[in-house]
Amino acid sequence: MQYKRILLKLSGEALMGNRQYGIDPERLKEYADEIKNITALGVEVAIVIGGGNIFRGVAGASRGMDRVQADHMGMLATVINGLALQSALEDENIPTRLQSAVKINEVAEPFIRRKAIRHLEKGRVVIFGGGTGNPYFTTDSAAVLRAIEVGADVILKGTRVDGIYSSDPEKDIDATKFDFISFDDVLKKGLKVMDTTAFTLSQENELPIIVFDMNTKGNLLKVVSGEKIGTKVNL
C-alpha cells in the first residue's frame, strides 16, 4: 500500500445517494464495502464526514439564523452521519470508534488525540464527528486538523467528481482535469479544493490531498495502492 494511515473526508451530501436529503442506506453500504477492502490490507483509516445532507450552518445563517447556533446544529448533523456510518461499518464486522469534538458521551467518545491514535494502531476505523467543536470552521478544516493530529500520510477527499478541473466540469465541457497540481498553483488559479483555512493548514504542514470520485467502485483501493486516480495536490 502506498499509504499506511489515511484520513478520508466525505461530504454529507455524498450520503444522500440519489435522494434530495437524508441518508441512503445503499450508499452507506457501498462506502462500508470500499473501506473494508482497504482495512483488510492493513490500512489505518480515520474519517471525517460533513453534515450538509441534514443541516448546513452557513445556509442556516444566510436565512437569518444566528451563525453560532447554526454551526452547532451542523456539528450535531455530522455526529448523526458518523453514527450511521459506524453502524454500516460494524455490519461489515469492522471495529470502529466514533469520537466527537462536541461532548455527547452517551453516543460517542470525546476526541482525545492519543486515544484516537491507539484505536488506529489497533486496526479500528476512527470516525471524527462534531467538526472542530467550534463555530465558523468547516468540516474541511476539521479533516485537515485531525489528519495532522493523528499523523495521517494523506487526506483523501471523496467527491462525486473524478478530480480537480480548471473549471466546473458539470457546467463547462472544456474544463481540463489536473492529474497533479501544486498548492501554489491551486491558489494562483483560484481553484476550490477546500476552504482557504483548511487548504492553508494542509500546505503549511506539507500534507498532500487527493481528490477522487468515491462513488466509483474500487477507486478507494486504487488510490491507497498508489494508482493515478483523481488529482493529487502536493508541494
Image (cartoon, rainbow, N blue to C red):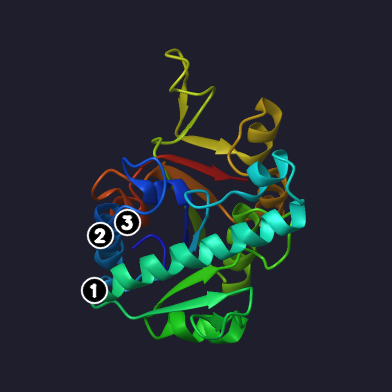
Q: Which residue has dot 1 on it? A: 91
**Mark sitting on residue 48:** none
- Asked whether the residues under the numbered discs 1 and 2 touch, taking CB atoms below 8 Å apart as contact, a structural biologist would say yes
**Mark sitting on residue 29:** 2
Q: Which residue has dot 3 on it? A: 225
Residue 73's x, y, as percent?
Answer: 62, 60
In the displayed structure, 93 sits above or below 24; it is below
The mark that comes first in sequence, 3 or 1, is: 1
Label 3 to label 1: alpha-carbon separation: 25 Å
Task: Determine whether the residue tagged by mark 3 lies in a helix, strand or loop.
Answer: helix
Q: Which residue appears at 40% of the width and 47% of the height? A: 14
Label 1 to label 2: alpha-carbon separation: 9 Å
Specify the amino acid type for callout 1. Asp
Specify the amino acid type for callout 2. Lys
Q: Which residue appears at 45% of the width and 13% of the height? A: 174
70 vs 232, nearest the viewer: 70
Residue 21's x, y, as percent?
Answer: 42, 45
Q: Which residue appears at 54% of the width and 68% of the height? A: 129
Name the side, left or right, on which 218 lies relative to 45: left
